[in-house]
Image (tube, grey):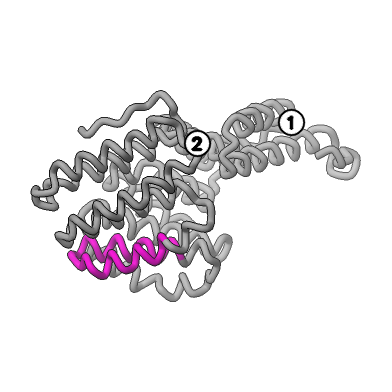
Amino acid sequence: MDLLDPKKIGGEAAAKDMRSKAFALLADCRRRASDLDGARRAIAEAWKWNQEGAGDPLDKAEIFRVDAAYAATIGEFETAESILEKALALCRVVADAHYEGKTLIQMAQTVGYLNPEKALGYIGRALELISPVREPRLELCAQHALAEFLTAAGRPQDALGVLDHVRPLYQQFPDERAQLRFCWLQGRVAHALGSFAEAAAILWQVREELFPRDQQRDFLMISIDLAEAHVAAREMATALSFLEETTPILAGWNLHRYALAAWLTFQKALEERRDQKPAALAPLFDNLRRYYRRSWYDPAAEFSLG
């Protein structure tokens, strides 16, 4: 930004617009790096320069999308959805169908774990709007979300059909993140279909791949999925042993005290309810997932068994 020459890029207004875009990018990078205070400051700078510049609607929409991603990261999913509604309105003003579809995918990813049926509605509309030619990876994101939320909505057979259909698309993106997410989703679908041993084997492999990559929340979430797969397979002793082995890993992270306490509380509750049927224990796993999605960064949030 310091190197921008307004004379070479269309004047002062254009330079301010570029600064706004740069701060939006910086905000998203800081969010992904867990620098939430830095992300918040960069979002404020992005809005400042946007208001002083030409104020292109799609530039505003992009800042809204970054702001919504920040809100979702700290667990404020309803706020994030509300912010994305503003971005969606701007997309419609300029009649950019592809960008509207992109925003709808983000809305689905924001609300999907709380309301998968609503997310499926967003994804259905998005798939009608996005241009795979304009942004090929976006179709992969949409199809992945479709399969994920079909599974969450209790329709794993439909999800399996989506996975079979998009398998060639995944092959076009051989990067590590895409392939790990694909395998993780295959494990969740296998679990939902009742193939618990297969699910556990897949989830264990993905978990092993995630461990050295410093993706702490993903590692914790897949650990919950893996423990549930063992419980569903009526391997409670294995699940409890696995949870106990995972505890020191979590203790070595810089988690807030309630985040670690939630894991210990969950572990104790599962031990006490070990004689219950797996279906009766499913809400316990769901509550823990919901807690970490909402409260990963909230040191004041205590965990409730529900």
The C terminus lies in quadrant: top left
Magenta span has 185?
yes
* Other residues around mark 1 within 10 Å, as few (<14) / some (14–19) / many (≥20): some
| Residue 242 visible in this rendered orientation of the protein | yes
Position above or below: 11 against 145: above
Q: Position of residue 158 (x, y in %)?
A: 25, 64
The numbered disc on residue 255 is none
Find the magenta span and give its range: 180-207
Q: How many marks?
A: 2
State whether the magenta stretch is mostly helix, strand or loop.
Answer: helix
Position above or below: 158 against 275: below
Which residue is the site of mark 1? 53
Magenta span has 213?
no
Q: Is residue 230 left or right of residue 139?
A: left
Name which quarter of the figure residue 124 lies in: bottom left
Q: Position of residue 151 (x, y in %)?
A: 27, 57
Question: At numbered mark 2, what does the secondary structure look like: helix, strand or loop?
Answer: helix
**Which numbered disc flags the more N-terminal residue, 1 or 2?**
1
Residue shown at 85% from the left, 41% from the top? 4
Position above or below: 228 against 163: above
Position above or below: 161 against 47: below
